[in-house]
Image (tube, rainbow, N blue to C red):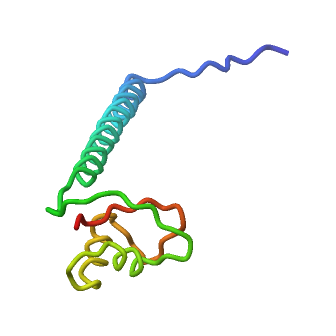
């Protein structure tokens, strides 16, 4: 029995195709990395911008007590405005998705 030659021999056209595929793969990796970095930096900038966004209301921090709601917190501030407006300001200041608050939660509230 003789050993068969199992080496792969590419034609010039085959070598050219392999080089093209390798170049395309490297280009895809580079472009993908650039897109990932750009996405990361844009999302970080958006988060930083939203955190520093000012809505023009002076605020102070208040800790929610046991059994308190947003309405109770707003009422206890003693602000001479409609309580609904104060609740709306608290929701906006704290970027709340729901009106539910929990004991121990710190909220920014409008200053009197």
Question: Residue 98, relative to residue 104: is it above or below?
Answer: below
Q: Nearer the viewer, residue 38 or 14?
A: 38
Taking the image as shown, residue 29 lies to the left or right of residue 6, namely left
Q: Is residue 66 above or below residue 84?
A: above
Q: In the rendered image of this protein, does residue 68 appear above or below residue 47?
A: below
Left or right of 43 in this view: 68: right
Instruction: Give the residue at the far top of this rendering.
Output: 2
Q: Residue at x 33, y 32 (%)?
A: 30
Quadrant of the image containing the N terminus: top right
Residue in the picture at 39% in, 74% down: 73
What is the count of numbered marks? Answer: 0
Query: Which residue ends up furthest to the right in the rendered image?
Result: 1
Q: Position of residue 78 (x, y in %)?
A: 29, 75
Towards the viewer: 69 or 15: 69
Q: Which residue is at the front of the view, 86 or 21? A: 86
Residue 27 horizontal/vertical position (percent): 32, 33
Q: Quadrant of the C terminus?
A: bottom left
Residue 43 locus on image (x, y percent): 30, 48
Quadrant assignment, res 99:
bottom left
Measured from the top left, where is residue 19 in percent x and y?
37, 25
Q: Is residue 84 left or right of residue 54?
A: right
The image quadrant that residue 22 belongs to is top left
């Amino acid at each position: 029995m003789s050993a068969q030659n199992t080496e792969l021999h590419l034609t010039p056209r085959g070598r050219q195709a392999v080089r093209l595929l390798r170049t395309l793969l490297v280009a895809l990796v580079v472009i993908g990395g650039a897109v990932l970095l750009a996405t990361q930096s844009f999302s970080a900038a958006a988060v930083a911008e939203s955190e520093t966004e000012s809505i023009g209301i002076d605020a102070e921090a208040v800790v929610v007590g046991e059994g308190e709601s947003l309405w109770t917190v707003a009422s206890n501030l003693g602000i001479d405005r409609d309580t609904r407006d104060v609740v709306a300001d608290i929701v906006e200041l704290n970027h709340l998705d729901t009106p539910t608050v929990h004991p121990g939660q710190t909220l920014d509230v409008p200053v009197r």
